[in-house]
Amino acid sequence: MTATATRTSPRKRAGNGAARPVDGDEIGLDALVGHAGYAVRRFQIWIFQDFIRTLGDVDIRPTQYSVLTVIGANPGLSQMAVAKRLGIERARLVHLLDSLEQRDLVKRVKSSTDRRSHALHLTPPGKTALAKFKRLAAEHERHVEERIGKQNRERLLRILADFT
């Protein structure tokens, strides 16, 4: 075990009952050190922060990028299909699509086969914007590789492939 794993929480009460301030790195994690879910969540937080920083000038969030990428690769998909494929709640996707439509990146077209459904397409400005977003996302992926190494990134993608 590492020193971090065996360390007990240094947050001790002062004699007067007040908690003493502790630097975040000094706080022991106990069993969390061995939990894959905790490590994945912390990595996800770093990933999202870097993605948002890297694509900050174009104001695109990870979920918006995912939706635009899937629509771009599959023009004419229904909202339901996109929501299901990406694991997004339908109500959340509707709100997200509203914001992408307001930015003229996506358009909804009434389905010719199902009046209750809409086919999703990128607008011409949406196609141009997505190309730029992909270039910036590739820069973000380079940051990931710099952080964990090329082989570890490739291995991580293989491990996670069953969840995509």
Image: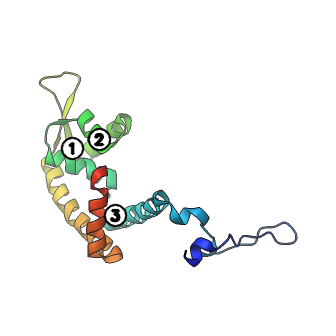
For marks 1 and 2, give the CA distance.
7 Å
Observer-nearest of 147 and 3: 3
- Its colouring scheme is rainbow
Residue 115 locus on image (x, y percent): 19, 21
Q: Give the quadrant of residue 133.
A: bottom left
Q: Earlier in the sequence, mark 1 or mark 2?
A: 2
State yes or no: discs 2 and 3 in contact (Cβ < 8 Å).
no
Amino acid type of the residue that numbered disc 1 sits on in the rendered structure: Val
For marks 2 and 3, give the CA distance.
20 Å
Would you call the spot at circle 2 few (<14 residues within 10 Å), some (14-19), or many (20 or more)?
many
Q: Earlier in the sequence, mark 1 or mark 3?
A: 3
For marks 1 and 3, give the CA distance.
21 Å
| Residue 51, visible in the rendered structure | yes
| Residue 164, visible in the rendered structure | no
Quarter of the figure with the N terminus: bottom right
State yes or no: discs 1 and 2 in contact (Cβ < 8 Å).
yes
Observer-nearest of 18 and 120: 18
Residue 82 locus on image (x, y percent): 25, 40
Q: Earlier in the sequence, mark 2 or mark 3?
A: 3
The disc at residue 106 is 1
Residue at x-position 19% and y-position 65%:
135
Q: Is disc 3 placed on a helix, strand or loop?
A: helix
Observer-nearest of 88 and 10: 10
Q: Which residue is mark 2?
A: 97
Q: Which residue is mark 3?
A: 51
Residue at x-position 21% and y-position 51%:
69
Residue at x-position 42% and y-position 64%:
43
